[in-house]
Amino acid sequence: MSIETSRKEKIFVIRLNRRDKRNAFDAEMIAGLDAAFNEFEDDPELWAALEMAQLVCRGAPISVQESLVALELVHSADNDFARQVTE
């Protein structure tokens, strides 16, 4: 699984785990992030979500970008997250 989640008290930890590809996004990772953030949003007991990775490439390889319609989901989620943080 490219996304792992855990809880530490009121913190929801989302860990990117696709080290062999430097955590570059693919369809599975995008779907996993979406599911993880939905899980966080649905639990009123959680106060914060923390996204972690040892290696970070916040994007997708060109070969994936050309065929991945789900990238629009990431853009939309980033905008929603940015609005929530600044409110």
Image: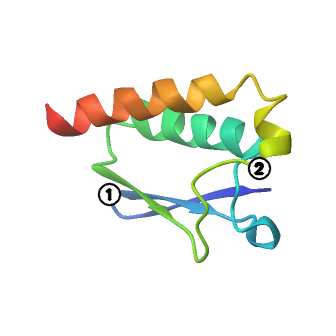
Residue under the point 47% across and 29% down: 77
Q: SS of the residue at dot 2? A: loop
Residue under the point 69% across and 62% down: 23
Q: Quickly name the residue at label 2.
A: 61
Residue toward you, 21 or 39: 21
Mark positioned earlier in the residue sequence (2 or 1): 1
The quadrant in which residue 56 appears is bottom right
The quarter in which the C terminus is drawn is top left
Residue 78 placement (x, y as % from top left): 43, 35
The quadrant in which residue 80 appears is top left
Q: Residue furthest bottom?
A: 54
User: Is 20 placed above or below 27 here?
Assistant: below
Q: Would residue 10 be found to the left or right of residue 4 on screen?
A: left
Q: Residue furthest left?
A: 87
Badge 1, how many Cα within 10 Å: few under 14, some, many 20+?
A: few
Q: Quickly name the residue at label 1.
A: 10
Give the label, 2 or 1, closer to the camera. Answer: 2
Q: SS of the residue at dot 1? A: loop
Q: Amino acid at mark 2?
A: Pro
Residue 45 placement (x, y as % from top left): 32, 44
